[in-house]
Image: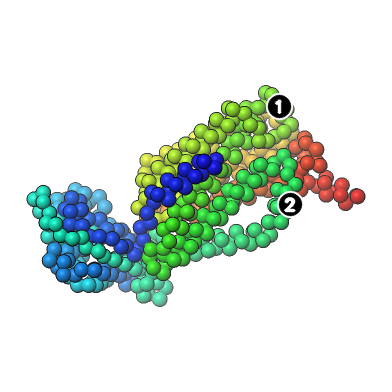
């Protein structure tokens, strides 16, 4: 697991680049000619007083090249089918870049609308294969939505609005829960017991999810001030979330498959213990590696999007990731059905059913939310998936915590001595009598 985590970290931090609403870069004539207009960025404006500000380091060179910015309103597919001259003529706004700073006010948007920004100059539509060797133009592009007072000061695009507040509330909830439960959880981990490994993995996964939320909050807190944020924090948020995902997957597969594959050799009175065998380890590691590869592939394929940890699954990697989670949930459902159908004890069946609820909520929340998000508008879909998955997976972890730290059901289900169980009623009563 540690080697896999290191590999994920290296690949993610080297591959991801944050695209912010303060965009700095170079206007390249050659790139504009090859692409029929150099793509700069996309921004979703909403309401009144949207603003675009472009600042140049070398205005005379821009004037000599007849440089200009082209703004297109919601024309992703249409632009690809146009010739170069037609593409340039279809721009809703053409902003000549002949001054050090140019401002463009965006008309009122009745609903959030995506706008594309392209760069072009006098050489963009020339058929000649040779472009004069002009220097590239350094630029800074700032894009603003109106804030609560109606002033164009908000760097967040419409599909990002509200995420900053969500991560703040999430961190606040983590902090309150930590203050309440850290002591009993520490005592349970310190005492050990048959579920010690499970509790450690659960705690690690929840802590990593909290680290991801913290990194996202830091990134967005800075982003709302300068429109660029802290790209490293965005990458770290993705990484911590990925490690949390693979840790939980490894734990759930090991619990179900390990116990099931060892049923012929060990008594059934030890439900869902972490039983290690070559077969169970192979299944768990195989699932973890597959999910890790798909997560990295998804990040590569959607590298231009913001660091929100979850995406609307518009890429092949994202769809395969959803299919993997559905397939794993069906595998666990088959395993748990076999266990429950042969179990005579009502208490044990309740134990397995509670475990199944936690597993299925963790596995299926993402695919279900992807399907549900179709009914929402474009600017709401990723927020619905991001917020919904984080909340559902947090609830799933709470369900599993309650199950494995139960003071009554867990004691009744396990056949082990109560002296070795963490937080059991029998131990408390025994000490009380002493």
Quarter that holds the N terminus: top right
Marked residue nearer the N-terminal end (2 or 1): 2
- Residue 211 can be seen in this image: yes
Which color mode does the image show? rainbow
Name the residue: 25% across, 50% down.
77
Q: Residues within 10 Å of mark 2 (few under 14, many from 20)?
A: few
| Number of numbered discs | 2
Q: Is residue 86 above or below residue 250?
A: below
Residue at label 1?
266
Horizontal relation, residue 362 to residue 100: left or right? right
Q: 4 or 258: nearer the eye?
A: 4
Residue that sits furthest to the right in the current view:
434
Dot 1: within a 10 Å radius of its alpha carbon, few (fewer than 14), some, or many (20 or more) residues?
few
The residue depicted at 70 percent of the width and 52 percent of the height is: 185
Q: Position of residue 94 (x, y in %)?
A: 19, 65
| Residue ranking furthest to the left | 128
Q: Is residue 90 visible?
A: no
Contact (Cβ within 8 Å) of mark 2 with mark 1: no
On the image, the x and y values in percent for residue 13 come to 43, 50
Which image quarter: residue 232? bottom left
Residue, x 35% and y 58% (percent of image)?
Answer: 19
Name the residue beneath numbered marker 2. 187
Check the image and report above or below for 175 versus 239: below
Q: Using the rendered view, name the quadrant where residue 295 is placed.
A: top left
Give left or right: position of 10 versus 70.
Answer: right
**Tag 1, which secondary structure?**
loop
Q: Decide which of 88, 302 is in the foreground and name it.
A: 302
């Amino acid at each position: 697991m540690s080697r896999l985590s290191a590999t994920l970290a290296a690949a993610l931090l080297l591959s991801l680049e944050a695209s912010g609403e303060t965009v700095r870069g170079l206007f390249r004539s050659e790139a504009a000619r090859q692409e029929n207009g150099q793509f700069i960025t996309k921004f979703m404006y909403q309401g009144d007083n949207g603003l675009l500000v472009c600042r140049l380091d070398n205005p005379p060179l821009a004037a000599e090249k007849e440089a200009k910015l082209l703004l297109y309103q919601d024309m992703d597919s249409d632009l690809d089918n146009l010739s170069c001259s037609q593409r340039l003529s279809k721009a809703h706004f053409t902003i000549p870049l002949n001054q050090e700073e140019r401002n463009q006010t965006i008309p009122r948007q009745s609903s959030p609308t995506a706008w594309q920004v392209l760069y072009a100059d006098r050489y963009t539509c020339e058929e000649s294969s040779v472009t004069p060797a002009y220097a590239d133009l350094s630029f800074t592009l700032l894009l603003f939505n109106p804030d609560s007072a109606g002033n164009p000061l908000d760097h967040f695009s419409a599909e990002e609005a509200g995420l900053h507040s969500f991560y703040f509330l999430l961190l606040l909830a983590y902090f309150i829960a930590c203050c309440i439960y850290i002591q009993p959880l520490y005592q349970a981990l310190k005492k050990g017991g048959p579920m010690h490994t499970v509790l450690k993995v659960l705690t690690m996964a929840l802590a990593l999810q909290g680290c991801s939320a913290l990194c996202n909050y830091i990134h967005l807190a800075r982003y709302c001030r300068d429109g660029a944020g802290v790209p490293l924090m965005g990458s770290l948020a993705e990484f911590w979330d990925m490690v949390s995902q693979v840790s939980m997957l490894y734990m759930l597969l090991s619990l179900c498959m390990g116990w099931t594959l060892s049923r012929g050799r060990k008594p059934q009175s030890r439900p869902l213990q972490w039983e290690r065998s070559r077969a169970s380890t192979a299944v768990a590691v195989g699932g973890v590696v597959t999910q890790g590869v798909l997560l990295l592939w998804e990040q590569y394929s959607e590298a231009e999007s913001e660091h929100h940890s979850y995406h609307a699954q518009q890429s092949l990697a994202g769809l395969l990731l959803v299919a993997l989670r559905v397939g794993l949930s069906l595998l666990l459902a088959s395993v748990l059905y076999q266990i429950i159908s042969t179990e005579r004890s009502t208490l044990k069946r309740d134990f397995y059913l509670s475990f199944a609820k936690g597993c299925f909520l963790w596995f299926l929340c993402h695919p279900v939310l992807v399907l549900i998000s179709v009914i929402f508008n474009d600017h709401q879909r990723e927020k619905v998936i991001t917020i919904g998955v984080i909340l559902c997976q947090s609830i799933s972890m709470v369900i599993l915590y309650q199950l494995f730290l139960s003071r009554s059901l867990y004691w009744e289900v396990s056949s082990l001595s109560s002296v070795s169980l963490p937080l059991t009623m029998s131990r408390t009563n025994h000490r009380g009598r002493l």
